[in-house]
Image (tube, rainbow, N blue to C red):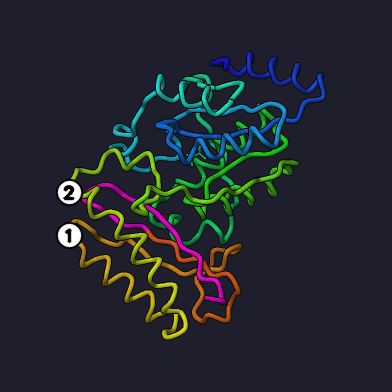
């Protein structure tokens, strides 16, 4: 695997691959890689001639300075994992390389960005659109791979792709979980042993709630999930919404869509964990 640190070297490399007629898969990441990221890279490996992965902790998507400062950075370990996953090129630029001047673009992300993470993290999705559009512009991949843990982010990226007219297939990949059910996340390393021990309750309670769909209306089920998670030590739910899988708009009736998705954010101590669950009709 070759590490590339500048946009000009990335351009040269991509031009060479294109001239050879190769298809390109891109896996954008912020590093601190884990098995969830590896699954995206392995899938990209299967579906493309060339795999590019980026590792960049994008400052414009952090609305909280402490979160940016404490975001884990593990470049050596990341490079080992990317090599194992079959990545050809790791793009690991500096902040100055990506933002030689401030990015003042404001994307009209519309309703998909107006709910859940949108109001909770003002500016976050615009920052995601800024960096992902830059990466798409540099690499012009055939396919780009994103994890479904950040369910709303995928809808926002699809909207950005539509706005910018990119011809890129956005591939969403299933959440990877630890054996105890906790969704894999770079932030999990910040949990204390006590918090890590209770964190799997999020997925357990969401998973159990799937069978309650038959017996409760949307509001009752949301309230039950929130109350049960809040009763777990260290946990405080920030929001729990059950939404349409494409528009991200909260539903009020199970018949509003065939594939509702419950999206949750929970503070476990001061670590913000996100997760989601599908509520298929036939359960
Ligand atoms: O999901 C992430 O890790 C980031 O939001 C992304 C898509 C790499 C953009 O910085």
In the rendered image, which quarter is residue 132 located in? top right
Q: Is mark 2 within 8 Å of ligand 1?
A: no
- Residue at numbered disc 1: 233
Residue 215: x and y, percent? 42, 86
**Labels 1 and 2 touching (C-beta < 8 A):** yes
Read off the magenta span.
Answer: 265-283
As measured in the structure, the alpha-carbon distance from the residue carrying label 1 to the one carrying label 2 is 9 Å
The quarter of the picture where the N terminus appears is: top right
Image: 99 above or below 28: above
Between residue 218 and residue 76, name the one nearer to us.
76
Number of marks in picture: 2
The residue furthest front is: 179
Residue at (49, 40) in percent of width and height: 127
Whether residue 281 is in magenta: the answer is yes
Residue 184: percent from left, percent from top:
40, 45
Q: Main secondary structure of the magenta part?
A: strand
Q: Which residue is mark 2?
A: 194
- The image position of residue 221, as x and y in percent, is 38, 78
Residue 65, above or below 2: below
Q: Residues within 10 Å of mark 2 (few under 14, many from 20)?
A: few
Residue 181, compared with residue 104, is above or below; it is below
């Amino acid at each position: 695997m070759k590490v590339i640190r500048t946009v000009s070297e990335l351009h040269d490399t991509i031009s060479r691959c294109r001239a050879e007629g190769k298809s390109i898969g891109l896996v954008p990441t912020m590093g601190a890689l884990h098995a969830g990221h590896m699954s995206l890279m392995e899938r990209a490996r299967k579906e493309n001639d060339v795999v590019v992965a980026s590792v960049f902790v994008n400052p414009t998507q952090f609305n909280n300075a402490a979160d940016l400062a404490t975001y884990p950075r593990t470049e050596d370990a990341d490079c080992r994992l990317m090599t194992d996953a079959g990545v050809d090129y790791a793009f690991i630029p500096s902040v100055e390389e990506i933002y030689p001047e401030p990015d003042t673009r404001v994307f009209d992300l519309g309703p998909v960005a107006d709910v859940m993470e949108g109001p909770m993290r003002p500016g976050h999705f615009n920052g995601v659109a800024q960096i992902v559009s830059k990466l798409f512009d540099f690499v012009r991949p055939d396919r780009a791979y994103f994890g479904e843990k950040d369910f709303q982010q995928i809808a926002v990226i699809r909207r950005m792709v539509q706005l910018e007219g990119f011809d890129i297939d956005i591939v969403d990949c299933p959440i990877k979980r630890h054996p105890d059910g906790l969704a894999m996340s770079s932030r999990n390393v910040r949990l204390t042993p006590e918090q890590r021990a209770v964190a799997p309750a999020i997925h357990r309670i969401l998973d159990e709630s799937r069978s309650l769909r038959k017996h409760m209306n949307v509001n009752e089920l949301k309230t039950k999930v929130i109350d049960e998670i809040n009763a777990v030590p260290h946990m405080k739910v920030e929001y729990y919404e059950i939404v349409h899988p494409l528009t991200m708009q909260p539903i009020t009736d199970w018949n509003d869509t065939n594939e509702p998705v419950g999206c949750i954010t929970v503070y476990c101590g001061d670590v913000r964990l996100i997760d989601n669950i599908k509520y298929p009709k036939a359960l």
